[in-house]
Amino acid sequence: MKMIEAIVKPFKLDEVKDALLEMGVQGMTVTEVKGFGRQKGHKETYRGQEYTIEFVPKVKIEVAVTDAQAPRVIETITRAAKTGSIGDGKIFVRDLAAAVRIRTGETGETAL
Amino acid sequence: MIDLQRDCKRKRQGTLSVVGLTIVAVIVGALALFAGAVAAQDTAAPSAQVVAPVAAPVLKIDTGDTAWVLMSTALVLAMTMPGLALFYGGLVRSKNILGTIMQSIVVLCLVSLIWILVGYSLAFGPDKGGLIGGLEWVGLSGVGSEPHPIYGPTIPHQVFMLFQLMFAAITPALITGAVAERMRFSALLLFAALWSLLIYVPVAHWIWGGGWLGKMGALDFAGGAVVHISSGVSALVCAIVLGKRRGHGSDYMAPHNLPFTLLGTGLLWFGWFGFNAGSALGANGLAASAFLATHAAAAAGALVWMGVEWAHRGKPTVLGVASGAVAGLATVTPASGFIGPFSAIVIGVFAGFLCYFAVVWKGRMGYDDSLDVVGIHGVGGVFGILATGLFASKAINAAGADGLFFGNAGQFGIQTIMVCAVALFSVVGTWIILKVVHAAVGLRVSPEDESTGLDLSQHNERAYS
């Protein structure tokens, strides 16, 4: 199992969600986050006074998937979240040791 | 400047009582003067009534004129409260909005009483050597519903006094933008009271009250020098003496609510029609002409600031449009009753351009004029007074004079003298007042209070909970 963590532009959230649902992902967790990568924030100007906002608002999507699904999930997120301009975000993939569905006690891939 | 902050803690205790007492003392002193004047009048022969000499042709109140100037007075009130209060309130950080609004409102109240008790007499009372008015009208003695032959011959004298009161009140309130987010409330009250009496009152007398600049022929229709240069230059001194806000240049200090600032801009623009067109002191063609000049300059200032910023920084900003409108309004003020609409547009264009670069260059000068009083009112006021010496035309206002562009180079010289005199007097006077206020109560809040914000530290309230 893999835990896929995608940090995307907030306005791309709906597209990514719809694309993932369409390809069979059952659920996801979404968090509003702030951060910066190579984009290094953005600038605001008030009467000529510039402020650099280092931490830019982003959305973090976490999806737990089977090993077989992982490559397609990554490909889907990449496609749906891409605008081609700087600041599109990143995807991180981790091995997932265990999963439990609380209601039934199911474990492993059946719990996803 | 660092020692100012260090001093703060030491002076925290007992500050309020000191300022409270001082303000009470000022008011009591004024009342004493008032009583003295009344007594003097009682002992003098009735014919010695210098006040409002009723000239042979009886002055008749015109209802239309009176209605317009009364309305204009209320419009200028709206410029300070809530106009300026919201304009400034939106520009500060959210922890300081109540403190900032409070400054405008309380300065308005304080100066109103000072003006009624003694300020009006010293500014507009019978001239003493061209420098100051006399005490004859202290406590509005002799200032009644009869018109005054010079101060609006068709409106009650009290209406003129009230109209001028609103000018006196907004001027120190303008300065609060330069000391935003760090001045102790008690120090601000003391400063406003002293500044109003010692700077505003003499300058108003020199130019409008029969003083030396007015006699020389200096033209200031609605307060370019009296209001904008005096407050703008004093704001510079305040920003330098108080020092920068903590974290200036490193912390995020962007305006917290630009819609408030826009609301304030709208009220300022709206009220400015009273400020400038009301200065005609009648509902007449001159009022209409001043109204037109005011609006044209504001629109031109807003568009030019927006355009310059667009070209210079890549984006047209909402705050830029608001700032440009105020710059245009402040700049056209002294000229508004002497110029036609096309001169007004030219003045507005230069206002947008000059004030934009004044505000941008502020960053390199190293002082923290937090809400740009110097860049907009100071620079706009100076340029406006000089522009009056260029664009004034007797074809618009026969009571005025022709400027340089209409063949009268001398007027430009007189306007230059006015700029220098008012600026120099304001710099020296404000510096002395600040030193006195600092010695009395301390100018700045403590570093901890500054970081907490004025709302909680000075007023025990928060705006957004």
Image (cartoon, rainbow, N blue to C red):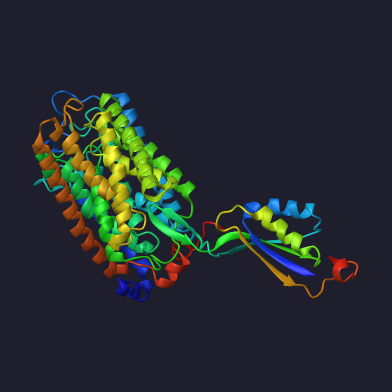
In the image, residue B450 above or below residue B321: below
Left or right: residue B110 versus residue B454 is left
Q: Nearer the viewer, residue B88 or A79?
A: A79
Q: Quadrant of residue B60?
A: top left
x 79%, y 75%: residue: A97
Left or right, residue B131 beside residue B345 = left
- Picture quadrant where residue B53 is located: top left
B129 on left or right of B221 = left
**Residue toward you, B334 or B375:** B375
| Residue shown at 60% from the left, 52% from the top | A83
Q: Quarter holding the C terminus of chain B?
A: bottom right
- Where residue A42 sits in the image (x, y, percent)? 49, 58
In the rendered view, tell whether residue B151 sits above or below residue A22: above
Asked if residue B120 shows in the view, the reply is no
* Nearer to me, B225 or B244: B244
Task: Please name the residue shown 83% across and 65% down the image.
Answer: A112
